[in-house]
């Protein structure tokens, strides 16, 4: 077993984003062979083959996910929504809620088109046995892709309902007045959603009708969308009643604990399970490299694993086979390869770059280092697994239920119908929960224990065995002409990925490229992915070039931007912050902007450096994401992104040596706290005329480079790394 | 060998037969089914597990059941016992003091303890006390606004 990403692995995954050309698959997905290869037992095979014959009380699968993709084009209304006898409409989606606000937003979307109050809409999210597959929760796709899909289905349903009500009331559809679940005709007769729910014709209609081209309610008419609706289930959260994945309890459930290797790449040579098996109520299991224990409490399970830990003999790679964090950037540079597989894709070339670089009066080269960081969601990976006659149900926190479904299928050699993954609203993701490690482990333990098992990773396990935002080395080679215009731009990203690799600035000639390298740690998605790295390097370089051109950082950027949305947010932030005034006053300020996933952000930061420590005084950020669907949630997301981005700019960095993480604790890996909170000013640039796009990621990409600019103003020192070093 | 420990949780007495070293957090969650109190780190670093022990905000993950025995414990589930939300709970809803919400029970318990001893806590007091409670969604602006509201001040958050 290795914790390295294996880019050549052939582990087949469902195509998670296949109808989303806006998202490049490889940017998001960590592909690797399964962590564990479990032994085959004959009974299992028979069980798997026979699974189709076993009928248990599972929801009818319809267009359910079942690990694969169903064409959405022939989605039927019945797959998307049900009308209850109480007049409450249940809407289904494979999207998950991890704190970004999707449950509230999708509830608003459905309520808008059904013209119902939000409490008459209930959302079932991410149950692979029940929900149509809208893909995983990644790439800020819920807003531009799932919201319209839910709206179309609900709008089509509304039309069908009106027609049905008309037939029932013996009036033409045009005579039906529909309001909040009530249908009235001019002679005063009325019927309700609840009445229609039981109607056979409605069931038949929903079974056959698909969300055709029904007009959606225009922005000007919005009554529910566009309002600052509070988080659905907020009351359950503040009273401790909301059940996160780690809170799921089943009758007769045991708690599990997995034995971890001492270092990355270690394989298990031998182990004596007896000390654990002799403990009261403990089941210990070894299956290949997998070793774990279950007990009546998680404490006992952990003691049982401790009891056998010392009997384990591991084959470990020699310490010098591991790359250490202090050799990281050198290692990435040495192993960088042009033809490097998936991560190597992306980028483009334009103009005669080489000639421009060589002939221009001023040439500027810079290298930037981007550390490995971790998502560290407050809820670590957790799963509860239950077997029932060869069928497996797992409740777990993941952003990719279909992928986890497929991981479980392949780990246990089960048919698609024999696996069900349910994702309760989860305690944070940030791109860090695309995988199903805890689900597979809990399922293996539950199989051994013969009862449901709950497994929750420790913080140390999460820091060590989850994955990381890729580290990177970024090299920029640029040239200016006599007028201070960028005439050549050569941008190379090694290892961290292609998001926002292309420059939004006007440059006569250039190249952007992404090179793959040997990644020492397991790496995957992150909030806004590599745009956190690429935008940092590009914006830092823009500051350096501005200085070389003798220009103000704002004016230099404006001089290279076409009129448009990016320029608009840049000006909005600069104006609100009084950039020009504060520059003239000599304040320690920095500015940056960027775009990714169709939204636009600009930030101004004021900072001070005291005793070698950066203090962020204030951040003024402008953001634009088209028509705003929930201003309250949008503001939270923008604020959260800024502060999370400051964490990566100020302190966050994974350190590792000899195949271990050296700071696998919140004591040593310091995330932002309340006393890091600067004064925040957010300017939402309203564009109701433009389609809504996601807002949970892009607002993170401008704050770090803007802070670097402020630090330069304070110290005269260019910071070319994340985290910034002074 | 399990011993029996008596704790009062949200006014109800429980006798728990268990290992003396077990964290109170596990006993609450696993034995008493009070899963509102969360695990974030298990080593006292994040305060997701904050409960009140004899009125004092305490990390349940580093408090053994043996240490907690004989005490009066308040958890998030006990705050709205009368069916009425506690003002701090209401403030967290009003000020959007949650994104994923996982840290929120711990945040609320810390704030409740602070405001009991200092009902009109200043911003400095609030930040000094609340800064131990991590929120990885980094929703600190709104959490601060919620505690300000509960302290009887108009929050200066820029909420719409
Ligand atoms: S879980 Fe107790 S302090 Fe983190
Ligand atoms: S709201 Fe998600 S950790 Fe605080």
Image (spheres, coloured by chain):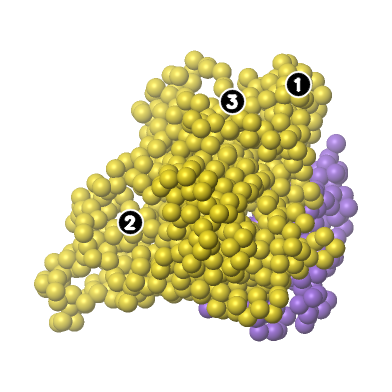
Chain colours: A yellow, B purple
| Sequence order check, earlier mark of 3 and 1 | 3
Q: In this rendering, which labeled residue sits more in front, label 1 or label 2?
A: 1
Considering only order in the chain, which callout, 2 or 1, is on the residue closer to the N terminus?
Answer: 2
Give the spatial CA distance, label 3 vs label 1. 22 Å
The reply to whether dot 1 and dot 2 touch (C-beta < 8 Å) is no
Residue at 58% x, 39% y is: A494
Q: Viewer-proximal residue, A321 or B104? A: A321
What residue did someone put label 2 on? A149
In the image, taking residue B38 as reference, residue A117 lies left or right, namely: left
In the rendered structure, the answer to whether residue A108 lies left or right of residue A113 reads right
Q: Of the numbered discs in the image, which one, if any, rests on residue B44? A: none
Residue B80 visible in the shown view? no
Near mark 2 (Cα within 10 A), the count class, few <14, some 14-19 or many ≥20, is: many
Image position, residue A142 (x, y; %): 42, 55
Q: On screen, A594 above or below A296?
A: below
Name the element at disc 2: helix
Residue indicated by mark 3? A36
Viewer-proximal residue among A83 and A541: A541
Q: In this view, does B30 lie to the left or right of A311?
A: left
Query: Judging from the image, what secondary structure is the residue with disc 1 in?
Result: loop
- Classify the position of the C terminus of chain A by image quarter: bottom right
Q: Which chain carries label 1?
A: A
Residue at label 1? A318
Of labels 3 and 1, the one closer to you: 1
Kindly report the distance in space between the C-alpha atoms of the residues bearing marks 3 and 2: 37 Å
- Expressed as whole percent of the image width and height from the top left, the position of residue A152 reads 29, 60
Q: Which residue is drawn at 77% across and 82% down?
A: B120
Which chain is disc 2 placed on?
A
Give the SS element for disc 3: loop
């Amino acid at each position: 077993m290795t914790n390295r990403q294996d880019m050549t692995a052939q582990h087949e995954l469902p195509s998670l984003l296949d109808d989303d050309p806006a998202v490049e698959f490889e940017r998001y997905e960590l592909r690797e062979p399964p962590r564990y290869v479990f032994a085959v037992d004959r009974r299992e095979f028979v069980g798997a083959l026979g699974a189709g014959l076993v009928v248990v009380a599972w929801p009818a699968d319809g267009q359910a996910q079942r690990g694969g993709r169903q064409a959405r084009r022939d989605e039927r209304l019945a797959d998307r929504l049900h009308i209850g006898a109480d007049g409450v409409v249940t809407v289904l989606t494979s999207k998950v809620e991890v704190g970004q606000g999707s449950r509230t937003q999708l509830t608003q979307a459905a309520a808008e088109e059904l013209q119902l109050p939000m409490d008459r809409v209930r959302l079932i999210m991410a149950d692979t046995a029940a929900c149509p597959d809208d893909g995983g929760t990644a790439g800020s796709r819920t807003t531009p892709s799932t919201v319209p899909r839910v709206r179309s289905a609900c709008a089509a349903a509304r039309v069908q309902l009106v027609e049905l009500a008309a037939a029932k009331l013996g009036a033409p559809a045009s005579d039906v007045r529909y309001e909040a679940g009530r249908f009235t005709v001019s002679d005063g007769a009325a019927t309700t959603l609840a009445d229609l729910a039981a109607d056979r014709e409605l069931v038949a209609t929903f079974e056959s009708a698909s969300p055709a081209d029904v007009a959606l309610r225009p922005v000007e008419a919005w009554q529910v969308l566009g309002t600052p609706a509070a988080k659905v289930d907020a009351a359950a959260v503040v009273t401790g009643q909301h059940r996160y994945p780690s809170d799921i309890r089943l009758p007769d459930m045991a708690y599990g604990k997995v034995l971890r290797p001492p270092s990355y790449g270690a394989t298990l040579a031998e182990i004596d399970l007896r000390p654990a098996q002799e403990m009261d109520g403990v089941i210990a299991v070894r299956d290949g490299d997998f070793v774990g224990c279950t007990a009546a409490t998680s404490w006992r399970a952990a003691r049982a694993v401790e009891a056998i830990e010392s009997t384990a003999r591991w084959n470990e790679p020699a310490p010098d086979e591991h790359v250490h964090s202090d050799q990281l950037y050198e290692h990435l540079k040495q192993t960088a390869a042009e033809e490097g597989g998936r991560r190597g894709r992306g980028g483009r070339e334009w103009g005669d770059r080489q000639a421009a670089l060589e002939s221009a009066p001023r040439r500027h080269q810079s290298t930037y280092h981007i550390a490995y960081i971790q998502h560290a969601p407050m809820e670590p990976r957790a799963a509860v697994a239950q077997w029932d006659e060869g069928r497996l149900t797992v409740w777990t926190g993941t952003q990719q239920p279909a992928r986890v479904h497929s991981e479980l299928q392949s780990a246990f050699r089960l048919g698609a119908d024999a696996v069900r993954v349910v994702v309760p609203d989860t305690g944070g993701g940030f791109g860090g929960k695309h995988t199903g490690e805890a689900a597979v482990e809990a399922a293996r333990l539950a199989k051994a224990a013969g009862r449901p098992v709950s497994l929750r990773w420790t913080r140390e396990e999460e820091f060590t065995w989850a994955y990381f935002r890729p580290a990177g080395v970024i090299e920029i080679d640029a040239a200016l002409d006599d007028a201070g215009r960028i005439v050549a731009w050569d941008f190379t990203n090694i290892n961290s990925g292609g998001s926002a690799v292309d420059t939004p600035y006007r440059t006569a000639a250039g190249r952007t490229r992404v090179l793959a390298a040997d990644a020492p740690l397991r790496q995957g998605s992150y909030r806004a992915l590599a745009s956190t790295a690429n935008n940092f390097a590009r914006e830092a370089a823009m500051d350096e070039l501005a200085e070389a051109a003798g220009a103000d950082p704002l004016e230099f950027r404006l001089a290279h931007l076409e009129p448009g949305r990016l320029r608009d947010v840049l000006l909005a932030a600069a104006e609100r912050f009084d950039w020009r005034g504060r520059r003239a006053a000599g304040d320690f300020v920095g500015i940056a902007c960027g775009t990714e996933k169709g939204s636009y952000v600009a930030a101004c930061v004021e900072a001070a450096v005291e005793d070698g420590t950066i203090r962020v005084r204030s951040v003024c950020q402008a953001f634009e994401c088209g028509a705003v669907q929930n201003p309250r949630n949008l503001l939270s997301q923008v604020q959260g992104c800024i502060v999370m981005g400051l964490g990566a700019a100020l302190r966050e960095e994974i350190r590792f040596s000899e195949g271990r993480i050296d700071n696998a604790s919140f004591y040593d890996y310091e995330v932002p706290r309340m006393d890091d909170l600067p004064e925040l000013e957010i300017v939402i640039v309203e564009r109701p005329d433009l389609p809504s796009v996601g807002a949970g990621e892009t607002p993170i990409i401008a704050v770090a480079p803007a802070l670097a600019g402020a630090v330069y103003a304070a110290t005269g020192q260019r910071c070319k790394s994340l985290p910034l070093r002074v | 060998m399990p011993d029996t420990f008596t704790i009062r949780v949200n006014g109800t007495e429980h006798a728990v037969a268990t290992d003396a070293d077990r964290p109170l957090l596990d006993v609450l969650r696993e034995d008493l089914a009070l899963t509102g109190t969360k695990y974030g780190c298990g080593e006292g670093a994040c305060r997701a597990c904050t409960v009140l022990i004899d009125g004092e905000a305490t990390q349940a993950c580093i408090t053994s059941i043996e240490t907690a025995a004989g005490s009066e414990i308040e958890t998030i589930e006990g705050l709205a016992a009368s069916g009425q939300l506690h003002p701090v709970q209401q403030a967290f809803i009003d000020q959007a003091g949650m994104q994923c919400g996982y840290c929120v029970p711990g945040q609320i318990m810390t704030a409740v303890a602070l405001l009991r001893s200092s009902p009109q806590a200043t911003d400095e007091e609030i930040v000094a006390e609340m800064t131990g409670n991590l929120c990885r969604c980094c929703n600190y602006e709104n959490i601060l606004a919620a505690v300000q509201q509960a302290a009887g001040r108009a929050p200066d958050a820029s909420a719409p």
